[in-house]
Amino acid sequence: MHHTHRVSTHRGHQSNDDCVPADPRATFGKHVRKLRLDRGLSQENLAELADLHRNYVGGVERGERNIAIISIVRLAHALKVKPAKLLERIP
């Protein structure tokens, strides 16, 4: 089943792009969570390895954060994958 949603812009306005299949932040976050759990890491462990705050990692996994490229690189290195691996599930 394909879900669509409205994407909020940085100013909180709604985009009219209803053809977006899923929020890419949520897709990214679910993938990070899967990779973290596959490696037996807690959010706190991952945050420490990535030099990020544990609350930030939780927000990323829940799709609440529009993550910066530097944070993607830090998470990838902490998970021992290439940054592109974290983005592979985003259509």
Image (cartoon, rainbow, N blue to C red):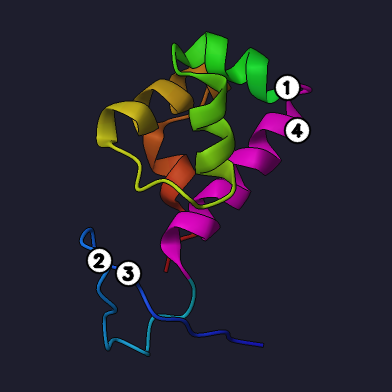
* Residue at the spot 49% in from the left edge and 73% down from the top edge: 22
On the image, the x and y values in percent for residue 11 come to: 20, 62
Kind of residue at badge 4: Leu
Q: Is residue 11 above or below residue 20?
A: above
Q: Residue at x 49, y 85 (%)?
A: 4
Question: Where is mark 4, residue-wise?
Answer: 37
Q: Amino acid at mark 2?
A: Thr
Q: CA distance from mark 4 to mark 2?
A: 30 Å
**Numbered tag placed on residue 42 in the rendering:** 1
Q: Residue under circle 2? A: 9
CA gap, disc 1 and disc 2: 30 Å
| Magenta stretch prevailing secondary structure | helix
What is the C-alpha distance between the residues marked 4 and 1?
Answer: 7 Å
| Quadrant containing the N terminus in the rendered view | bottom right
The percent position of residue 5, horizontal first and vertical second, equals: 46, 81
Q: Which mark is residue 8?
A: 3
For marks 4 and 3, the one nearer the N-term is 3
State which mark lies toward you, 1 or 2.
Answer: 2
Q: Element at badge 3?
A: loop
Which residues are the magenta region? Answer: 23-41
Name the residue at 47% across, 15% down. 50
Q: Nearer the viewer, mark 4 or mark 2?
A: 2
Q: Quick one: quadrant of the C terminus? A: bottom left
Q: Looking at the image, tell me whether mark 1 or mark 2 is earlier in sequence order.
A: 2
* Residue type highlighted by circle 3: Ser
